[in-house]
Image (cartoon, coloured by chain):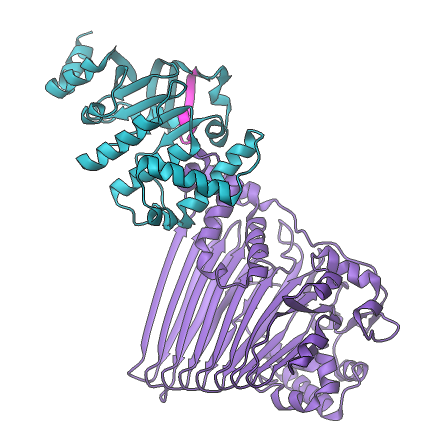
Amino acid sequence: MISIKNLQASIEDKEILKGIDLEVKAGEVHAIMGPNGSGKSTLASVLAGREDYEVTGGSVTFENEDLLELSPEERAQKGIFLAFQYPVEIPGVSTTNFLKTAINQVREARGEKALDAVNFLKLMKEKMKLVDIDQSLLSRSLNEGFSGGEKKRNEIFQMAMLEPKLSILDETDSGLDIDALKIVADGVNTLKTNNTATIVVTHYQRLLDYIVPDYVHVLYKGRIVKSGDKSLALEFEEKGYDWIKEEVAAV
Amino acid sequence: MSTDDQILEEFTSKEYEHGWSVDFEADEAPLGINEDIVRFISAKKEEPQWLLDWRLKAFDQWKQMKEPNWANIKYPKIDYQSIRYYSAPKQDKKPQSLDEVDPELLKTFERLGISLQEQKRLTGVAVDAVIDSVSVATTFKDKLSELGVIFCSFSEAVQEHPDLIKKYLGSVVPANDNYFAALNSAVFSDGSFCFIPKGVRCPMELSTYFRINAANTGQFERTLIVADDDSYVSYLEGCTAPQRDENQLHAAVVEIYAAKNAEVKYSTVQNWYPGDKNGKGGIYNFVTKRGICSGDHSKISWTQVETGSAVTWKYPSCILKGDHSVGEFYSVAVTNNYQQADTGTKMVHLGKNTRSRIVSKGISAGKSQNSYRGQVEVMKRAEGARNFSQCDSLLMGDKCGAHTFPYIDIKNKSAQVEHEATTSKIGEDQIFYCQQRGIDEETAVALIVNGFAKEVMNKLPMEFAVEAQKLLALTLEGSVG
């Protein structure tokens, strides 16, 4: 689905990603772990097309298309979804109104007819059940005054509504208590199909108890220094990140 | 350039949609102003002597007044002798019904999206259409008159209802109130008059549509709304002008009189030509709007969406004279490119337990300057007066300015006055968040701006709200940068 080759990116001339290689196929869940400042969130942002970052080398192919050529909205329209670490507040715009605008622009870009109010509400109801979100939250201004848990749940709800091919969860677990974490993970698991893929970016192993990855990659100083299966994540749980730092230093 | 700036830049490059003009034969006064011009206009309108005298007195007072310079706006000195004070599309005789109106004129309004023919059929909104100096058509007159509602052009009201005009003209905005009001009083050519009798709830929105068409012409219209005891009316005002390189002057006066228990809602969508991207041309909009809540429990509510004009100087105000009367001001002012707006309100609390509410949303983009100027005055006798003011500014890009000038003057200890103000910037984060969900930059900006202005937009009548939303987006098109 997505093929990342030797991806390099910098912000304000500071090199953050120093050559990332990653291959994600449909049906797979990949976890990207690593200490703070290793470039995890940068990778998520670069894939979503945030313009603060300058791609200085490498390539990203998404469904046989050069992803780096596309604007952020085109990437979203083609099925890339980023669950934000810090969801942004938009005063005066309800989640409902926001999603209606988004869905209809995505449909328009795909040459599909806009959803009318009736069908949109139907879709909302269906997805609300799926991620267990309350109607009252959706009529409030987007993310304004939401608790940390509400914000993250709202991200997953948006993901459910937009039905992306590739979902990137950027530290979705940060700031969540265990109950909220379960709800978010349940949502992600429910939405998972053989045709979709997920990249979970996380600092802690605990989210991976609930969203079980097929592969775990460790990002350190802008490079993937270790890849493995779920047991790799458990190793971190026990040893912390220091052993990776030592290992890399020794090379 | 940051993303913010680029989006802003693209957004602002959108052209003014109503910039065309139509050639119809016009009946004009020579350029410039003097006593003869005042007499000429009055004669054209076949006005009674008292009204001519009123105009001449206003003209005398205007000559002795100075143009105000306290507002946060800069513009070249206006040459009052190079303006034409009267221009009327020529019609052979005064039309008796819409069917007799010059088809070219009707077409003009159709291009503006206001089909007068259509309006005739649809219920819901009655329209008085004013081109340059005269009213060309008023719809629904018959239906309204069954209820005793008078809705007609100002000139017609002078002929048909002289007693009402004599009683209320200048009663809220005296002829010598300020420089521009005095000028208007001397040379006003037309406008709308509306009278709602006792106990009548006007069943449809009344609307005046203003259009400046002729070159070098100033527009000086006057609107007078009188709501008798226990009556209600909702009034809409819209305006556009052709795109011209020269600046044109618009100096209007609106007076509202609300008697006991009466309620008047006045909504404006102001879309005068704002000038081009480099600040060339555009309307100078110097308007005096004031309402008096004369009777107890009366209410006047101003809602305005200001997107046009090169320069806006406008402070729709309420004098809360009746006990328990209520004044409201809801405003969205958008400025882009080199536009300048100095707008706000004045709430004067005279009566007991009077309440006022001010919600102002300023949006600045490009190199524009947007100022809120408001005054809350609580007089000695106004026991229990309350005011709440909220002024929010939204900045797009880093070359524009937002300013807030709140004045509070309290002479009664029991008053409760609250003022809240915020300034924010459309964030790159917000735009990126929208984009990540598949929304393009322009739609994202429109969404964010409409969200910011929502509290005010919600106050607009349905018929206007959609148009106003589109207008907001259009005004800012090309402006995120």
Q: Where is residue B223 in the image (x, y as percent from the top left)?
A: 64, 77
Q: Residue furthest top?
A: A251
> Based on the displayed image, in which of its 4 quarters is residue B227 positioned?
bottom right
Q: Which chain is purple?
A: B
Q: Is residue B156 left or right of residue A217?
A: right
Magenta span covers which residues? A47-59
The relative height of residue B77 versus residue B319 in the rendered view (above or below) is above
The relative height of residue B349 versus residue A25 in the rendered view (above or below) is below
Viewer-side residue, A63 vs B277 = A63
Q: Where is residue B188 in the image (x, y as percent from the top left)?
A: 70, 78
The relative height of residue B339 versus residue B56 in the rendered view (above or below) is above
Q: Position of residue B447 (x, y in %)?
A: 48, 47
What residue sits 35% from the left and 27% below the top? A191
Viewer-side residue, A178 vs B64 = A178
Q: The cyan chain is which one?
A: A
What residue sits 36% from the left and 42% below the top? A88
Residue A14 in view: no
The relative height of residue A49 versus residue B320 in the rendered view (above or below) is above
Residue B299 in view: yes
> Based on the displayed image, in which of its 4 quarters is residue B119 positioned?
bottom right
> Based on the displayed image, in which of its 4 quarters is residue A61 positioned?
top left
